[in-house]
Image (cartoon, rainbow, N blue to C red):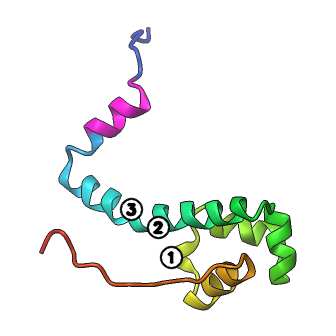
Amino acid sequence: MTKNTKRPSLAQFKAEALKEPTFKVEYDALDAEFALMSQLIAARKIRKLSQEDVAKLLHKKQPAIARLESGGCYKTSIEKLHEYAHALGFNLEVKLVRDRQQ
């Protein structure tokens, strides 16, 4: 027989997982990537463009844009990010920010 237990909500699961130091370090490391992805998507929406539209501007296929916007930022080059930003009429700024832990 299986026990009928209620699964935790995503918020509850996340709160519990973040108590684990190793998990928290890895989770916090993704902050910059999530922030950049959000900015890329926001810029595209400001310009009222679809992923397909951006792909055409960059002479790419739509799945490449989807991958970039869904977490491929750290796996791509600064040059590609610059091209994406420029195609939307934005400039890419990259800066170093002091680590909060040091």
Residue shown at the point (33%, 30%) measured from the top left: 12
Could you tell which of marks 1 and 2 lies nearer the N-terminus?
2
Give the side of residue 95 with respect to residue 87, left or right.
Answer: left
Q: Which residue is mark 3?
A: 31
Please report contact status of discs 1 and 2: CB closer than 8 Å, yes or no: yes
Crowd around label 3: few <14 · some 14–19 · many ≥20 (10 Å): few
Q: Which residue is mark 1?
A: 74
Above-or-below relation of 99 to 5: below
The disc placed on residue 33 is 2
Examine the residues drawn in magenta and state their main secondary structure: helix
Give the side of residue 27 with respect to residue 1, left or right.
Answer: left
Task: Please check the rendered image and state whether residue 11 is part of the magenta-colored stretch, yes or no.
Answer: yes
Task: Please check the rendered image and state whether residue 53 is part of the magenta-colored stretch, yes or no.
Answer: no
Give the side of residue 41 with respect to residue 54, left or right.
Answer: left
Distance, label 2 to label 3, CA atoms, is 6 Å
The magenta stretch is 8-16
Question: What amino acid type is highlighted by mark number 1?
Answer: Tyr
Please report contact status of discs 2 and 3: CB closer than 8 Å, yes or no: yes
